[in-house]
Amino acid sequence: MIALEAATPYQEKTFQVMSNWFREAVTPEKEVSLYGKAYKAVGTLHGLAKGKYENSFAWRLVESPFNFLTEFGLKESATVLQEHWMEQVVAQAEVVDKNKLIGVLFEKENGVVWKFAKGSGGPFLQNTVHGYQSRNVFSSSLALEPSLYTFLDQGASVVINRQADYRVQITNRPMKVNRDATEEPHASVITVQCADDEIVLENDNYPRTQNFTWSPDTCGDVNLTIEFPGATLHKNYKGNMAFADFLAAFVDGALRLTPADFPEEEGHLQNANIKEIILTYAIKGQERVLRLLELKPNVPKVIALPEQQHGESVFN
């Protein structure tokens, strides 16, 4: 107990001591932690005195120092764990390009969330069939914010559902404009920028099919070009989720655009009485790509508060 008291003036040291105690409850180590030694000593005393000395006041005198140091250790650990979360996860999330956020957070091997969950947070967290929750060690646990568990569960679903690449088949259909327009489109081109090459589907009002093998890790901007006799229109989708954004714009296979979507050519379109441009495609395999857009991680700023840590009597 004296050695345990000597460690408590230093927050980081206290955090390490508590981490070791929680960790060895799952994976026993040859080198027993200070908390483990103190717990074992009091437990041994309980075993020797069982049935002989039942004075509750005396036992409170024996147990109270350890219970106090346990609660103190939880409070100090909450402070340190919160600092680690801010440094290792929140700070990274705030500076990364939002289009790369999911990968930076949840990439299976190097995602900062999993590095935290396996590192600083590992001793205090467990992943169960019901999702993430606090690990309980001898009636003690670090009280963490519910938003953290929700966030970790969301991240786990990303790892499970995210594929290395996605295959989407797109077949063009005839292009249309409103009936009273004085010009009609004669061609359109979808271009997806990827690291190795461009993926292109041209539409000149004859059926063509293109298989798009797309990955948010290696593909980027999407450019849609529509050609009229008197103007060429460009609509761009930016970032590594651009292809998903492009697919999400379709309703029942149709992308409906207006002159407002093309500010630089809006005057020409109005002069040609073009009120609506309708691009129709038969699309297969887009469901899993669109599901990625549902993953909008909200990184919690606060995951642990010292004032919420209340240790229970370990020897009840």
Image (cartoon, rainbow, N blue to C red):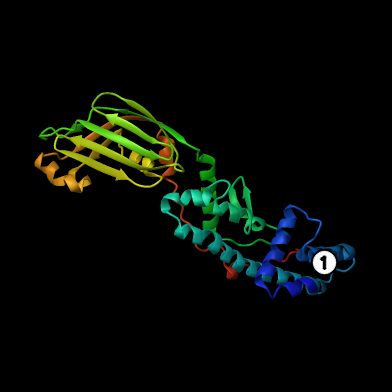
Image position of 197 with respect to 38: above or below: above
Q: Position of residue 282 (x, y in %)?
A: 32, 28
Check the image and report above or below for 119 versus 59.
above
- 18 over 152 or under it: above or below: below
Q: Quadrant of residue 79?
A: bottom right
Query: Which of the pair 47/224 is nearer the observer?
Result: 224
Q: Is residue 87 left or right of residue 25?
A: left
SS at badge 1:
helix
Quadrant in the picture for residue 146: bottom right
Q: Pointer 1: residues within 10 angstroms few (<14), some, or many (20+)? A: some
* Residue at position x 64%, y 70% in the image: 76
Q: Residue lying farthest top? A: 207
Q: In the figure, is residue 105 to the left or right of 310?
A: left
In the image, residue 226 sits, relative to residue 147, either above or below, namely above
Horizontal and vertical percent position of residue 60:
78, 72
Identity, as a three-letter code, of the amino acid under mark 1: Val
Placement of the C terminus among the 4 image quadrants: bottom right
Asked where in the image residue 256 lies, by quadrant, the reply is top left
Q: Which residue lies at the image location 42% right of the left edge and 50% below the top edge? A: 99
Q: Nearer the viewer, residue 40 or 209?
A: 209
Q: Which residue is mark 1?
A: 42
**Position of residue 111 in the picture relative to residue 290 (left or right):** right
Q: How far across and how far down the image is residue 135, in percent? A: 66, 56
Give the position of the N terminus as an image quadrant: bottom right
Spot occupied by residue 152 in the image (x, y as percentages of width and height): 54, 52
At x 81%, y 71%, the residue is 59
